[in-house]
Each structure stands twice: as C-alpha cells, then as structure tokens.
Image (spheres, rainbow, N blue to C red):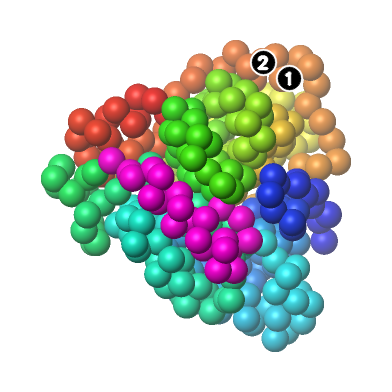
Amino acid sequence: MAEIPSVNLAGVEKAMPVIGMGTMAFPPADLETTKAAVLEGIKAGYRHFDTAFSYGSEKALGEAVAEALRLGLVESRSDLFITTKLWASFAAPDQIVSACKASLENLKLEYVDMYLIHWPVRLTEIVKKTPVPEEIVKALDMKGVWEGMEECVNLGLTKGIGVSNFPCKFLEEILSIAKIPPAVNQVEMNPFWQQKKLRDFCKEKDIHITAYSPLGANNTKWGDNRILGNDVLADIAKSMGKTTAQVALRWVYEQGVSIASKSFNKERMRQNLEIFDWCLSEEDLDKISQLPQTKGVTLAAVLGPHPLVLEIDASL
C-alpha cells in the first residue's frame, strides 16, 4: 500500500493526506458504483476523500466508510480525512449549520474534517439544473456566511473550515473578519493553469491550496485532454518511465499543493499514488513552467454568463 505524506493545516489539529480521492463523476455515477470505487481507493491506500453536497456522492462515500470500518480496512473513523462543501443554495448565514448537518446525515458521520464554501456566490433557490436565472445569483454575505462556517467548528460539526474557488480579493475580505481563518482554498490547478499569483498569496497568508482537476478533467463537459494529450508532459513521462498523469500530479505536489484527483479505475487510482518516491528535474520544471495557460473551469459555464458571475470568473 502506498505511503502518502500529510500536510499540517493552520488551526487544524489533524494533518491532511496530500492526495485525496475525488468523488465527483460526470455523468453522475450511481451509489453502488461510487461506493465500490471508494472501497477500492481505501484498499489502494487513500485516506482522504473529497465530496460535496452538489456532487450527490456524500451518501455513497458514507456507506463506503461504514463498510470499510466493518471490514477492518481502516481501524477507526479518525484514520480518514473527509472533506465536503457548502453548496451555493445554502450559502446564507442562517442556513449553514443546517446544511452542514444535512451533509453529515448523508455521510452518516458525526463530523467532517474539512468543510469548504463551494463557490463565492449565493443562489436564492435550490436548483435542479444549470445554467440558472440571473435573478437568483447573489453576492455572498461574506461576514455572515463565514460566521456560520465558524459556528460549524464551534459545534463540533467540522474540524476545519475553508473555501473553494476563492480569488485573492475574497480571501482578503474573509481574513479581515475571521476569528477562525480559512485553512484551505481548493481551486483548479494543473500544469496548464498554474495559479502562481494565488499560490504566492495563500502561502503568505498560511492558507493551504488543494488542486482539483489536476489532470484537466478529461471526459467531462468542462474538461479536455490538454494535459493527458500534451507532448511536453508525455516526453518527460517517457524519459522517466512514468505516465503523463503521474508527471502532472508530481508537478502539482512539488509546488507545495495537495491534490484532489478522481479516478474510479482501479489501476489508475493506484498509479496516481505512485508519485512520492521520485522528482522532476530542473529542466523538466522549466519546460512545464513555459506551458500555455488556459483556465478550464468557469462559474459562467455552470451558472450562466451573468454579470456577477463573469466578475468572479475574471478575478479567479
């Protein structure tokens, strides 16, 4: 079984494994498929699992955790690090605690290890499909929402809190009012969207970055094969006897960033863990630093090209 390093997070007692298994599938996977994949992930060595209310995978993850404990694949709940996220439809100050409790009910857990604000925007309705009407897209009440997140910590519902898809200016706003600063900012990051400015800012503020779509989210409606089909990365991989995916993941890890990577393929989920006993050369790093930068995930692609949404996208 792979030995996965962990990272210490500001204000969070438990260290977080630097690679987590994502559970968002496109098209959405059924409960049994996701549950089986998580169990395979646990067998492979994953101990960090990333979900969200909006993914529809919380129940499957919870069932897999319960099964893993029953089978003795893990000794206790405390051996696992579980991250979930507050969906935008519940991003109002008076809804946050109940939203966190709803996720815990789905997961059948007493607490999560990390609870993140999924997007820096609020939707005034529960949505079943996207894009959404402009009139339900509202700016986040940053102070009220963050106080709700802090209450989740105070109530023992989560061990740590953070954000996802937050640009520097919104992080500044939270830091100016937070009693408990955000420990994590989970954002799109990969060799083709390297996030240097945001990484530097978060490092200065002691906010850890977790990268989603580290392989470009190929075979999804928002992703493509610009990473897995890239000749520069493929040549580096070939010279080292690695896969292109392993090179991309290793690059992310060498930036001091943790990873949320989704694969339900047994072989690939194991390959994704085999990135910790080798390094990229300075020449390789230089080649990767020169790759053209293209953002893959935009809020406009999800919610629609509304003025507030486009403003947020421009700052990400």
In x, y percent, where is residue 81? Answer: 67, 62
Res 157 seen here: no
Label 2: which residue? 287
Q: How many marks?
A: 2
Image position of 276 (left or right of 116): right
- Vertical comparison of 134 with 34: above or below: above
Tell which residue pokes out farthest to the bottom in this image. Answer: 70
Find the magenta span and give its range: 139-161
Q: Amino acid at mark 2?
A: Lys
Q: Residues within 10 Å of mark 1 (few under 14, many from 20)?
A: some
In x, y percent, where is residue 66? Answer: 62, 81
Label 1: which residue? 284
As measured in the structure, the alpha-carbon distance from the residue carrying label 2 to the one carrying label 1 is: 5 Å
Residue at 49 percent across and 31 percent down: it is 172
Query: Residue 38 appears in which quarter of the rendering?
Result: bottom right
Q: Secondary structure at mark 1?
A: helix
Q: Quadrant of the N terminus?
A: bottom right
Query: Residue 288 appears in which quarter of the rendering?
Result: top right
| Residue nearer the viewer, 158 or 78 | 158
The magenta stretch spans residue 86: no
Image position of 296 (left or right of 239): left
- Vertical comparison of 19 with 248: above or below: below
Q: Amino acid at mark 1?
A: Asp
Q: Residues within 10 Å of mark 2 (few under 14, many from 20)?
A: few
- Vertical comparison of 124 with 299: above or below: below
Image position of 210 (left or right of 92): right
Q: Secondary structure at mark 2?
A: helix
- Vertical comparison of 190 with 302: above or below: above
